[in-house]
Structures are given as structure tokens and as C-alpha cells.
Image (cartoon, grey):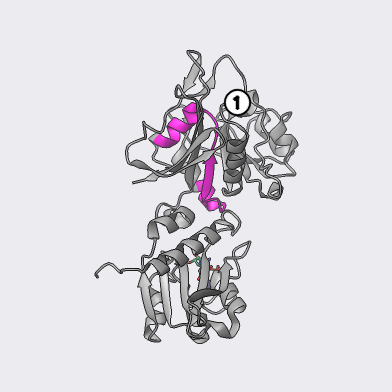
């Protein structure tokens, strides 16, 4: 089938829909954070008459919210959806049927839903009702929100975003200085937003012990958006007396270990830590299997924050889909711990998708080519 062509207006509304969907990233359970805009010309050019995002927890779906907001204005509207409308009966009727019943005349979609209950059936319901359907509008951009959902459906694994703060001389830390500050305040705010947009944050046990972080999201207004914290701790070395355990009321804490029956794992468990029993591969926790386990408990997007070794392992195991790279003008020098990635040394198969400045620090959003 020939590739669809989309107008500038289509792309403008789809870009807005994709941005809207970001808001509920990591908040919709196992459901993807889908968004819908209903757009209609009321006499002065096209305007949004209804908008919706998959609700927190996963339901109602985005289309239902947009249709409720538009009411009668939905008749004759174009629906911009970031994911194919569902075709299956859940607690509500299929969204494709609701869109037909509401009288929309055109559907513009970014991505097809891989769910067996949907995949193509949603579009068919609309086309069978003589509604024009165009698929593939800004699909790459839509992947920035829905990629982990698509990826999980293919690989059955959670995917990792690697977060790295790198000095001007390519270092992510200093052997001689604990908790080296590489980036400044604005970049740190952005990295807390990244926490809020992921369901889990992963660090190694050395980071947990040496830095003693809480790993919570402390952006004003988003304090309730802290992701689950996961510590990779092959030998169950983590103590119950640390900031992660002390903040367990704020966000769940998991320890992934090869020794789930050890006394220390039991002590952690007694303090409310959830223990994930892991396989070992070459002396370290087997990451592909761990990412499968995480998908099984509803985690699809994990932010990997801690340790050069851990970053390199996630890259080597091809578990990284995105890299959020901050670069500063700080120089660390010879005692530095070198970064596996910098903006002019990307891993094979990755490219820079977006650049930004946060105060004096440069930011690169890096994804797969
Ligand atoms: C939509 N709009 O906003 C979302 C969709 O358990 P259920 O009934 O909510 O179904 C989950 C499936 O619904 C999920 O696997 C995906 O196929 C679809 N998600 N569909 O029409 C939405 N979030
Ligand atoms: Zn639906």
C-alpha cells in the first residue's frame, strides 16, 4: 500500500496529541498512554472540540474522554489518535464503535495497535462505516510515548532509558569524589521529570550504598510521581539502614538479587522491600530476564541511572531504547570514570533525536535510528 500523505494541519494536530499523551506516561498501568483530539472547522478553520488521554490507571480510554468533551461537536469531526482505536469489549464499548456512533468523518492515526484483539480490526470497523482512515501520521514521534508498549508486545520485556550526566572530558563520576555534581539545577529538574515519566528507576547496589540516594521525584507538584526503585544487588549486600528503605512509603522498593533466601534479603523483605529472584550471567544479574520479569509486574519503562558498569551492561544486552544525555562544562580530570556514551560518540544504531539547553548544560535525546 502506498504511504499516506498528511497535510501540515494533520501533523500539527497529531504533534499536539502526542505531547498530550506524555502527561500520563507511566501512570496508565499496563495500558499505553494514548491520546485523542477531535478537530472540526466551526467556521474559522479547524479547532479542537474534544481532547482525551487514557485515564490514570488505564481507563477510560482516550477516545471516550475526547468524545465526552466534544458532545454533539464530534459529528463531522476528524479524530487524531496516537494509537489505533480499540475493537474489543472491555468495561466500555470498543472505541472504534464509539467513534462511528458519534459521527466522526475521518480518522488520522499514528500507530497500529499490536494487541491481538485490535491490530487492524479497529481501522476495519471505521472503514466499514465509510469513515476515511489514514495511518502513519508522525509515527516516529508517537513512538517516543508509545514505544515501550509496542516494544513490550514484541519482546515481552521492559525497555530501558539510559540517563547519563557527562562532563566536558567525557566522565560520569570521579573516583576521588563522592556524589560529584556534573550538571546544574535546571538539568537536575529535567532528570526528575524523567523519573516521573518512567515506572521504575534502576541503580546498582554500589550507587545505593555509596551515594545513599532516595531516587524519588522531587519536582514541585510531581512529588507523588516517584517511580518504583530497583536496586541490582547480586549478592544481597544492601543494608536495611539506608535512604531507599527509609523512603519506602513514598515509592516501592525492589531488590533484584541472586540470593533471595539470604539473611540480608530476608531482612530487607521484613522492611517491606520486594525481592526479585534473578538468574546470574557471568557473575552478574541476567538483565534480559530481569527486564522480562519487570514487564510481568507492569513495568515497561525503566530509567537506568546508576553506574558506568550498569550502563554498559544494558547497552551490551541491547536493552536500551533511549538515552537521555546531559553534558556540562565541568572538567573531572584523570581520576574520572569514563562514560560509555557522549554526544559525539553514540553507540551503533543510535542517533540524536532532539537537543535542548537546560541552563548551562546541553541535553540530547538519543534514540534508535
Ligand atoms: C484505545 N484507547 O486510550 C487505550 C487503548 O483492558 P482494556 O479494556 O483497557 O484494554 C487494554 C488494551 O486497550 C490495550 O492492550 C490496548 O490494546 C488498548 N489501549 N486503546 O482505544 C486507549 N489506552
Ligand atoms: Zn478503546
- Answer above or below: position of 295 versus 161: below
Q: Position of residue 104 (x, y in %)?
A: 47, 82
Residue 367 inside the magenta-drawn segment: no
Circle 1 residue: 181
Q: Is residue 122 visible?
A: no
Question: What crowding class fits label 1: few (fewer than 14 Cα within 10 Å), some (14-19), or many (20 or more)?
Answer: some
User: What is the secondary structure assignment of the residue under circle 1?
Assistant: loop
Q: How many marks?
A: 1
In which quadrant will I find the N terminus?
bottom left
Q: Is residue 163 visible?
A: yes
Name which quarter of the figure residue 175 lies in: top right
Residue located 57% across and 69% down the image: 52
Residue located 72% across and 44% down the image: 250
Residue located 44% across and 36% down the image: 314
Q: Position of residue 57 (x, y in %)?
A: 63, 61
- Answer above or below: position of 125 versus 232: below
Q: Position of residue 91 (x, y in %)?
A: 60, 75
Q: Out of 108 and 44, give the one closest to the viewer.
A: 44
Give left or right: position of 53 versus 104: right
Residue 297 inside the magenta-drawn segment: yes
Q: Position of residue 173 (x, y in %)?
A: 53, 22
Give left or right: position of 291 versus 52: left
Q: Which residues are magenta?
A: 293-315
Residue located 46% across and 36% down the image: 286
Q: Out of 285 and 59, give the one closest to the viewer.
A: 59
Name which quarter of the figure residue 271 lies in: top right
- Answer above or below: position of 255 versus 340: below
Amino acid at each position: 500500500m502506498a504511504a499516506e500523505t498528511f497535510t501540515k494541519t494533520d501533523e500539527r494536530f497529531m504533534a499536539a496529541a502526542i505531547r498530550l499523551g506524555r502527561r500520563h506516561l507511566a501512570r496508565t498501568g499496563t495500558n499505553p498512554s494514548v491520546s485523542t483530539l477531535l478537530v472540526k472547522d466551526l467556521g474559522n478553520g479547524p479547532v479542537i472540540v474534544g481532547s482525551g488521554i487514557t485515564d490514570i490507571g488505564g481507563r477510560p480510554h482516550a477516545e471516550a474522554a475526547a468524545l465526552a468533551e466534544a458532545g454533539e461537536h464530534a459529528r463531522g469531526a476528524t479524530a487524531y489518535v496516537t494509537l489505533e482505536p480499540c475493537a474489543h469489549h472491555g468495561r466500555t464499548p470498543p472505541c472504534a464503535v464509539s467513534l462511528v456512533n458519534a459521527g466522526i468523518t475521518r480518522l488520522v492515526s499514528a500507530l497500529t495497535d499490536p494487541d491481538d484483539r485490535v491490530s487492524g480490526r479497529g481501522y476495519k470497523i471505521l472503514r466499514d462505516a465509510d469513515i476515511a482512515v489514514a495511518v502513519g501520521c508522525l509515527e516516529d514521534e508517537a513512538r517516543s510515548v508509545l514505544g515501550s508498549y509496542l516494544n513490550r508486545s514484541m519482546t515481552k520485556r521492559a525497555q530501558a532509558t539510559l540517563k547519563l550526566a557527562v562532563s566536558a572530558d567525557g566522565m560520569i563520576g570521579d573516583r576521588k569524589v563522592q556524589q560529584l555534581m556534573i550538571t546544574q539545577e535546571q538539568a537536575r529538574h529535567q532528570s526528575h521529570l524523567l523519573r516521573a515519566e518512567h515506572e521504575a528507576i534502576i541503580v546498582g547496589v554500589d550507587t545505593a550504598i555509596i551515594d545513599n540516594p532516595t531516587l524519588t521525584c522531587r519536582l514541585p507538584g510531581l512529588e507523588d510521581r516517584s517511580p518504583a526503585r530497583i536496586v541490582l544487588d547480586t549478592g544481597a549486600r544492601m543494608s536495611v539502614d539506608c535512604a531507599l528503605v527509609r523512603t519506602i512509603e513514598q515509592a516501592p522498593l525492589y531488590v533484584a538479587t541472586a540470593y533471595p533466601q539470604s539473611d540480608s534479603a530476608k531482612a530487607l523483605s521484613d522492611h517491606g522491600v520486594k525481592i526479585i529472584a534473578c538468574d546470574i550471567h557471568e557473575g552478574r544479574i541476567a538483565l534480559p530476564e530481569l527486564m522480562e520479569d519487570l514487564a510481568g509486574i507492569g513495568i515497561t519503562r525503566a530509567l537506568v541511572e546508576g553506574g558506568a558498569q550498569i550502563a554498559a551492561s544494558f547497552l551490551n544486552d541491547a536493552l536500551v531504547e533511549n538515552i537521555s544525555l546531559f553534558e556540562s562544562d565541568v572538567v573531572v580530570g584523570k581520576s574520572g570514570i569514563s562514560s560509555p556514551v557522549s554526544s559525539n560518540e553514540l553507540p551503533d544504531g543510535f542517533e540524536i533525536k532532539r537537543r535542548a539547553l537546560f541552563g548551562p548544560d546541553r541535553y540530547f535525546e538519543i534514540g534508535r535510528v
